[in-house]
Image: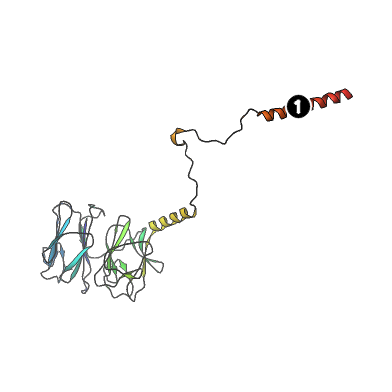
Amino acid sequence: MLFAIAVDPRGSSSALMLWRDGEVGELVRVGEHATCDMRLPGAGIASCDVWRGESNWLVRRPDGSVHDVEDGDNFVVGRWWLLLLADEAPKASGLPTGSHRRFGVPDCPAAQGFESEDRRLADIDDDLPRLLGGGDGCAIKIALTRERFCAVVRRAGRATKIYPVPGTRLAVDGKQIAGPMQLGDGNVLAVPDSPPIRFVDADQELDRLLDSLRDEHPNRPEPASATPPGNAAPETTARRDPFLTPLEAALACGTLAAIVAQSVVTIARW
């Protein structure tokens, strides 16, 4: 699956996104010309091509160089910043081939998402990339920021990655990031002069809770197996030998003799 995402940090156009399933030989043309699959107004003569090879995606950049596409590959096409997200799972997101101009916010709650002051901002419930920032095309809104587009966020399997737009001052847990990174439950994202937002992942939170319970009860016994290893009979509580020891037998005989003698004396007195 290939996602191509273009944003114009200086212009007023909404962000553009295009995706393809990845059949061998499939070609995506990006530029201002009317024949391009992704049209970038104002790109001028700058253009690029992305196509699917036998085992991976390749890209011809505006400078004419050809490279293998890596997840998070990005470069400038005219005045546009182009981000390429690629994986080896065809139709991983279940989305039909297509493109759109706005990044919608899902209505259904999901395990992963973003919150601000205990208010849910957006859910991440599929593999569709989402823009983060203050612009009209952003599904994940940061209030009061002057940065129209700060980053692209995408989930891949159980992991969620963030790809910062070059030139923005986006920080994660107080440290400015310059390249893609994987988000974890509780990470705080912020740009200057704007309220921070928090990434939440219910699955990671549950894993941490289970780990803490295991740490609190490290000696909890394991459930007993129905059949011990080696098909050996299960151990039972040790039982006393049913036969008396010699000492116990002698004491018993002495006691019996004393009882008999006492009985004889009692009868004789009668």
How many C-alpha atoms fall within 10 Å of the one at disc 1: few (<14), some, or many (≥20)?
few
**Viewed as shown, does residue 136 lie left or right of 174?**
left
- Image location (x, y in percent) of residue 191: 32, 73
Q: Nearer the viewer, residue 184 or 134?
A: 184
Task: Kindly indicate the quadrant of the structure image that contains residue 243.
Answer: top right
Residue farthest right in this picture? 270
Q: Where residue 233 sits in the image (x, y, percent)?
A: 49, 33
- What colouring method underlies this structural image? rainbow
For the C terminus, give its image quadrant: top right
Please indicate whether residue 212 sits to the left or right of residue 156 in the image: right
Quarter of the image for residue 78 reads bottom left
* Relative depth, front residue between 100 and 81: 81
Tell me the residue at 89%/24% (across/down). Answer: 269
Quadrant of the image containing the N terminus: bottom left
Check the image and report above or below for 28 versus 263. Answer: below
Which residue corresponds to the image point at 44% horizontal and 34% vertical from the top-left? 230
Label 1 sits on residue: 256
Give the residue type at disc 1. Leu
Rendering coords of residue 56 (x, y %): 18, 54
Residue 257, placed above or below residue 152 = above
- Residue 109 seen in this snapshot: no
Q: Quadrant of residue 253?
A: top right
Position of residue 4 in the picture relative to residue 208 (left or right):
left
Residue that appears at 38% across and 56% down: 203
Q: Position of residue 166 (x, y in %)?
A: 24, 70
Task: Describe the element under mark 1 as helix, strand or loop.
Answer: helix
Which of these two is toward me, 16 or 230? 230
Count the labels in the image.
1
Q: Residue at x 18, y 67 (%)?
A: 75
Res. 67 in view: yes
